[in-house]
Amino acid sequence: MSGAPLPGAAPAAGGGARIIDGKAVAAALRAEIARRVAALPFRPGLRVVRVGEDPASVVYVRTKDRAALAAGFDSATLVLPAETSEAELLATVARLNADPAVDGILVQLPLPPQIRSAAVIEAIDPAKDVDGFHPLNAGRLASGRTDGLIPCTPKGVMHLLRHAGVPLAGARALVLGRSQIVGRPMAQLLLAADCTVTIAHSRTRDLPAECRRAEILVVAAGRAEMVRGDWIAPGAAVIDVGMNRLPDGRLTGDVAFAEARAVAGWITPAPGGVGPMTVACLLENTLEAALARRG
Ligand code: GUN
């Protein structure tokens, strides 16, 4: 392939990608949400439910709770034992659905194997579904409506693309990963922003070639440093949703950052890119749910 940049994807001056600082964008969004919350006559209520002690979930849930408290929300975490039955978790969800002080409910995934996550997600009041995973909210998004509760990670990616000034309309976007949490809603949001969208996954033929066609590449594959520098078109925007722990303890994304940075036009680091935006968008969704519920 030629080394010429793709249209609409200008490389950074001086070579190398512009780094999209998710931490800074998230901090600004959180500060704005805190200002809006401080002006309300009530505190939006968030309840995060964790079942068991999955180490990554422990960290994620603590981060979400602290961010919610710092932004002035009425936030609390409910921790249930790993052996909790599906019926017990459904009873907890029903109680939170009925509690008028609760605007947002988040049940952290993954759940232990005896609990069907789909049954739990479908039990959450769609008006309190700040993850945007309920079929009603997912269906709204799939019908092209972007005014409802939208999953936090893809919503955060759209904030980052817009903040960086990446041209969206008409751009060829590829989403690597087809999960309910990231890949599918991500593709819907890019489509709503007038991108030409491809969803690739573990069974896609010649994945590197598919990736090289993309002007916007969103990687949510769940494999450390899977996307190499020669998978990336010169000037492309590369958004790394991955978070993997290497055997030496270091955290890394799904993109080989140093290689990719030399080719891309924009790139998010991992950690410090998409992750902080997921948390900020959870706060944004909780505020939106509170405003919609309380008028
Ligand atoms: N596990 C990993 N990411 C998420 C998320 O965004 N929401 C929930 N509920 N669980 C997760």
Image (tube, rainbow, N blue to C red):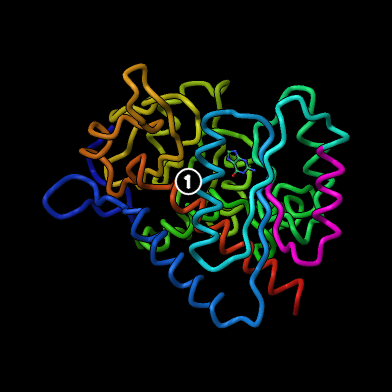
Q: Nearer the viewer, residue 287 or 39?
A: 39
Residue that appears at 46% across and 65% down: 30
User: Does the beta carbon at disc 1 come under 8 Å from ligand 1?
Assistant: no
Tag 1 secondary structure: strand
Vertical relation: 272 (above or below) 288: above
Q: Which residue is mark 1?
A: 173
Q: Residue furthest top?
A: 247
Q: Magenta stretch containing residue 95, yes or no?
A: yes
Q: Is residue 40 left or right of residue 127?
A: left
Which residue is at a point 23% across and 33% down the rendered structure image?
Answer: 258
Query: Quick one: which residue is furthest to the left in this view?
Result: 14
* Residue in the picture at 65% in, 62% down: 146
Q: Quadrant of the N terminus?
A: top left
Quadrant for residue 211, please give it. Answer: top left
Q: Name the residue at 38% across, 47% down.
A: 273
Q: Position of residue 132 (x, y in %)?
A: 69, 52
Q: Which residues are magenta?
A: 89-106
**On the rendered structure, is 62 left or right of 74?**
left
Q: Is residue 269 magenta?
A: no
